[in-house]
Image (tube, rainbow, N blue to C red):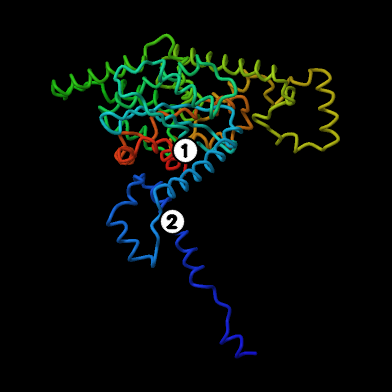
Amino acid sequence: MYHIKNKHQDTIPNDVVSVAAHTEVTELISRMIEKDMLPISLLRGDGFRELLAYTVHNYKMPSAEDIIRLIEGHFQEKAEELLVQLGKVEKVALTADFWTALPFQRYVTVSCSFITEDWQGRSVVLQTHKLSSDSHTSTDSVTERLFNTVETWVSDGLSEDLVRIIVAAGKLNFTPVLATLKWATTVISAETEVSISNIYPITFSLIQTHLVPKENDVEQVSEFKLKVQKLLQNHMEVDSNGLASKPALIASMLDPRHKHLSFLTPTGRLSAKVKLHELVAKLDVITTTVGLKDEHQEILVTPDVSREAAMPSQLRSDTKNTMMLLLGDNYSSSYATDSEAQVDYYLRDIAPSLDINPLDWWKVNGPRFPKLATLARHYLCVPGVSLPSLLSESGQTFAKMRTRLAPEHVDMMIFVNRNA
């Protein structure tokens, strides 16, 4: 028996092993092309073929069609996963990134940012469209492409007016203005998830502190500071009457690090607070309209049970019932049952350290301020820069890689690469 087992062990035929190994190599080639944004024409390279012939015995080089089919399969898998995830998200922010691969190849890549149920910020690419080489491409043509993307991925009924707002917003890119002070853009682009909540605090810091001419500044330095200061003031509309309504400032209020808006004047802070109250009130109207079941539930904000715990249970119960009968249920409640209370409690709360992630803060404190937490999901998902930032090293590398792609594969390849 021992002889039989050791001398006549079951073996897998070499041809079966070879086929399995070759299939795995082909799959790895497709993954490499996706991850490194390589052109499909790589398969025709003599050097690449020599490498595989040396490392993989009797390997049959796949055709371009074979690799494209694999990439298309990966694309479909990721697209289905993304559609399921987007179906669970209430609000998203769209970014249109216009770029040029070659002098006559113009594209627009539509990205989507959102906050998941567990307060994780995510940014994904939805679609890439090739634009006409005509430099006079109409806004309507771009709008139509963006509308088609929204309709395909994230809309059950978004209006065309909303997409026009998205197109207009795409022209307001903060990065070129702040690029004159590279360290400022470095700060804005440094976080893993870059929110517009940092835009106005940093802008006002530059205007009010770092760009103020000093006595020992030479004339050229003073002129430069004043020019950049004026540029920021005009572009960011810091003196605008409608500043409190700008999404970036609302996001700053919903970022617990910046909620006190100490960079604004008292009048500006009051206007921003009034705007926040308006947004929460609108949220109440929407909640009432859809008839949420928890409409009448009380929300715990700052519970204080220390005194109650120190009293005998029977005495505590009798005293509580008597006082409630005399003064009413909500006389000294530690619960916030209205929107204004939530806003006031939130603004009075001590601001956390600047190095915390605001999404982590909301993950812990969201139950205390549920209505504000809903607004935070809506506004903190809006990115402060396009993805990837063209001023970052990774952004420049990504842009160079994109120029090597054939136009017909750009959409599919960018989607698979960026959503890996």
Q: Position of residue 43 (x, y in %)?
A: 34, 51
In the image, what residue occupies the spot 39% across and 34% down?
Answer: 387
Q: Looking at this view, is 217 or 35 the one in front?
A: 35
Circle 1/circle 2 CB separation < 8 Å: no
Mark toward the start of the polypeptide (1 vs 2)? 2
Q: Position of residue 207 (x, y in %)?
A: 31, 21
The label shown at residue 26 is 2
> Element under label 2?
helix
Label 1: element kind: loop
User: Outermost residue, left direction?
Assistant: 219
Q: Residue at x 78, y 36 (%)?
A: 311
Badge number at residue 337: none
Q: Where does the N terminus fall, quadrant-wise?
A: bottom right
The x, y position of residue 76, in whole percent, is 52, 41
Q: Position of residue 64 (x, y in %)?
A: 39, 48
**Residue 106 appears left or right of 5:** left
Mark 1 to mark 2 CA distance (whole Å): 44 Å
Residue 224, located in which quarter of the rendered image?
top left
Disc 1 target residue: 356
Q: Residue at x 50, y 17 (%)?
A: 162
Residue type at mark 1 is Ile
* Nearest-to-viewer mark from 1 and 2: 2
Label 1, residues with CA under 10 Å away: few <14, some 14-19, many ≥20: few
Q: Nearer the viewer, residue 192 or 308?
A: 192
Between 218 and 314, which is closer to the camera in this rendering?
Answer: 218
Q: In the rendered structure, which amino acid carries the disc numbered 2?
A: Thr
